[in-house]
């Protein structure tokens, strides 16, 4: 039986950094490449860049197990990506976890957290947002996840190696 995880957490918490740290050492792990209406050169995660029209065509064709809109972009998790390995992980959205759990039976959530101070420092260091934008992101970070989910929490406030070890332990394929 395969395990499917949604990796979620506020902007600046280090989800991509943690995943990049552990994924190469886990051969039984498949990291889903999301479909996003963002230019390929925009930076950030490795994604399949599509136009809005291409995204809508794929959505209407039923390609996505899950899709949502956030921050002016559309995100899709391709259905075919979810059963390719014993353990699969995708970068998800905290706001859309209830829909994800309804669409993907047995979904487990990895909620990466950090203290407000750590998040504030990381967001400020990126230099991409105003102080008001950072404050709004910090307020959203404190919002609770929907009830009834299978949630694993990893605190990434401090040492990256400690948080990476916790993530590696969760994503390690179960040995027969």
Image (cartoon, rainbow, N blue to C red):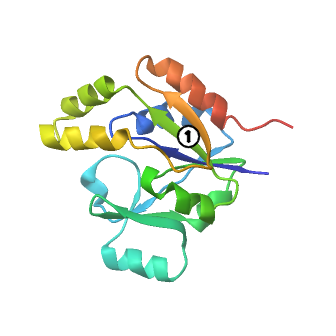
Q: Is residue 130 among the parts visible in the rendering?
A: no
- SS for callout 1: strand
Mark 1 surroundings within 10 Å by alpha-carbon count, few (fewer than 14), some (14 through 19), many (20 or more):
many
Q: Position of residue 119 (x, y in %)?
A: 31, 30
Q: Position of residue 143 (x, y in %)?
A: 40, 43
Q: Residue furthest right?
A: 176
Q: Position of residue 79 (x, y in %)?
A: 59, 67
In which quarter of the view is residue 26 placed? top right
Task: Answer with left or right where residue 37 lies relative to residue 171.
Answer: left
Residue at horizontal 14%, vertical 41%? 132
Residue at horizontal 56%, vertical 37%? 23
Task: Answer with left or right where residue 87 lies relative to residue 68.
Answer: right
Residue at horizontal 49%, vertical 55%? 33
Work out whether 135 lies above or below 55.
above
Q: Is residue 147 among the parts visible in the rendering?
A: yes
Camera-side residue of 118 and 169: 118
Residue at horizontal 48%, vertical 52%? 92
Task: Answer with left or right where residue 7 lies relative to residue 125.
Answer: right
Q: Count up the numbered dots.
A: 1
Work out whether 62 lies above or below 72.
below
Camera-side residue of 19 and 107: 107
Camera-side residue of 64 and 115: 115
In which quarter of the view is residue 35 placed? bottom left
Camera-side residue of 138 and 123: 138
Q: Quadrant of the C terminus?
A: top right
Q: Position of residue 98 (x, y in %)?
A: 54, 58
**What residue is pinned by disc 1?**
110
In which quarter of the view is residue 136 placed? top left
């Amino acid at each position: 039986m395969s395990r499917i995880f949604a990796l979620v957490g506020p902007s600046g918490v280090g989800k991509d950094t943690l995943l990049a740290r552990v994924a190469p050492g886990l051969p039984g792990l498949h990291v889903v490449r999301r479909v996003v209406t963002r230019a390929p050169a925009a930076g950030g995660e490795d994604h399949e860049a599509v136009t809005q029209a291409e995204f809508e065509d794929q959505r209407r064709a039923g390609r996505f197990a899950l899709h949502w809109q956030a921050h002016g972009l559309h995100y899709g998790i391709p259905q075919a990506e979810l059963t390719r390995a014993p353990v699969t992980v995708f970068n998800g959205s905290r706001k859309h976890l209830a829909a994800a759990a309804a669409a993907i039976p047995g979904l487990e959530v990895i909620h990466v957290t950090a203290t407000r101070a750590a998040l504030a420092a990381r967001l400020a260091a990126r230099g991409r947002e105003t102080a008001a934008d950072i404050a709004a992101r910090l307020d959203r970070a404190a919002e609770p996840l929907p009830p009834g989910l299978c949630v694993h929490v990893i605190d990434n406030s401090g040492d990256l190696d400690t948080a990476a070890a916790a993530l590696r332990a969760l994503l390690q394929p179960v040995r027969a």
